[in-house]
Amino acid sequence: MSDPFPFTPVERAAHARLDAQRQRDFIAVLAQCGFVGEAALRVGVSVAALEKLRYAAGGEEFRAAWDAARSCPSAREARRAARRTGRRASRPSPDLRQAEPPVFPPDEVSAGIGADGGGLEGPLHCSSSRPSRRTSYLAFRGDPPSPDDPLLGFAPYLHARPRRNSITPARQRAFIAALAATGSVTQAAREIGASLEALYRLRSRGGAEGFARAWDKAVDAGMARLEDTALIRAMEGELRPVVSGGRVVAWYRRHNDALTMFMLRHRRAHRYGSEAERAGTEGPDEQEIIDSINRKLDLMRARMEGREGIA
C-alpha cells in the first residue's frame, strides 16, 4: 500500500527517538486523530521535539507532510467528532499499553454536581490518559459552550493574507471553546495545534479586540468552574485509594482543612477573614444605633399622643 503522505525523513542523529520510522508513524497517526499532541503521545515523542524537527534544516518535506496530514478529511472529521463530544477520544499512553488499567470509583471519574445540586453546571471529564495526572484540577474539563453560545459570537481577527498555519476565525472560536472548558490557555492551545506565542501575538494585534474580550470571558468561566470544584472538594472531601500488593483494595474520604479554611476566609470574610476585613464589614456604629432607637421612640410617642387626642 502506497504512503498517502510521502516525504523524505529528516536526518537527525542528535535525537535518536525521532528516527525515520517514528517520523512516518507520527504523520500517519496525525492523519487519523487530527491532534498534534495526541499523535505525539501515541508515538512516544514530545511536541517540542517535533516542532524543532519541523523547522530544522532539511525539514521542508516533513513540514509539508505534517500540514497535509493535519488538513486531510480524516483528521478534520476526527477533530469535529472530538468537539461534538466535548472530549478527546481515549488514547493509550505508550508506556502503559500493557499495564492493567487503574480502578477509579465511577462517581469520581466524572466529578461534578448538576444544577439540582447547586454546584457545577455540568460534569467534568478527565482528559488525561496518565493516572499520575488525574489528581490535577487541570486534568478535568467541563462541557464546551454550545455553537450558539454568546461567548463564541465575538468578532474574530481577519488576516489580510492568511497563510496555511494562520489562526483562522474557526480556530479562534475553537480555542475560546476549549479555554472555557479547561480554564488553561496551554491546553486550549494544544487543542487547535497553535503555539502560545502565536496566540498572544494575535491577541495583541489591532482588530483582535473581540478575540481578546472573549479570551478574558473564557478564562473567567474556567476560573468559576475551578472555584466550584474547590468548593465541592472542601465540602465533600476527596476519595483516596488504599493500595495493597499493587491493587486498590479500598477507598477512604480525606477532607482538606486548609482548603476549607481558604474557602471560608474568602467567601465569609466578615467572619473568618483578617481583622481588617472583619472591621470593614462590621455593622453600624454606636451612634447610628442610638439614632435609630431615638427615631423609633419618637414614632411611638407620636402614636400614643395621637391615640390620647382621639380619646
Image (cartoon, rainbow, N blue to C red):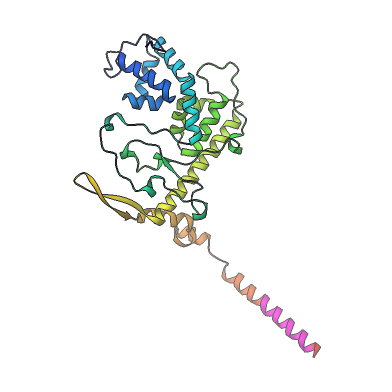
Q: Position of residue 44 (x, y in %)?
A: 31, 25
Give the residue drawn at x 49%, y 52%.
Answer: 119
Residue 260, position as x, y percentages in the image: 40, 56
In the image: residue 11, left or right of residue 279: left
State yes or no: residue 68 in magenta: no
- Regarding residue 162, the answer to whether it shows in the image is yes
Work out whether 166 lies above or below 308: above
In the image: residue 186, left or right of residue 10? right
Observer-nearest residue: 166 or 1? Answer: 1
Residue name at image x 29 percent, y 15 percent: 19
Q: Residue 47: horizontal and vertical position, in percent?
A: 37, 24
Most extreme residue toward the front is 1
Q: Is residue 220 above or below residue 161?
A: below
Q: Residue at x 49, y 23 (%)?
A: 76
Furthest-bottom residue in this view: 311
Q: Magenta residues, as a range? A: 295-308
Residue 253 appears left or right of 189: left
**What residue occupies the far right of the structure in this picture?**
310
Q: Is residue 299 above or below residue 124?
A: below
The residue at the point 38 percent across, 34 percent down is 90
Provide the major secondary structure of the magenta segment. Answer: helix
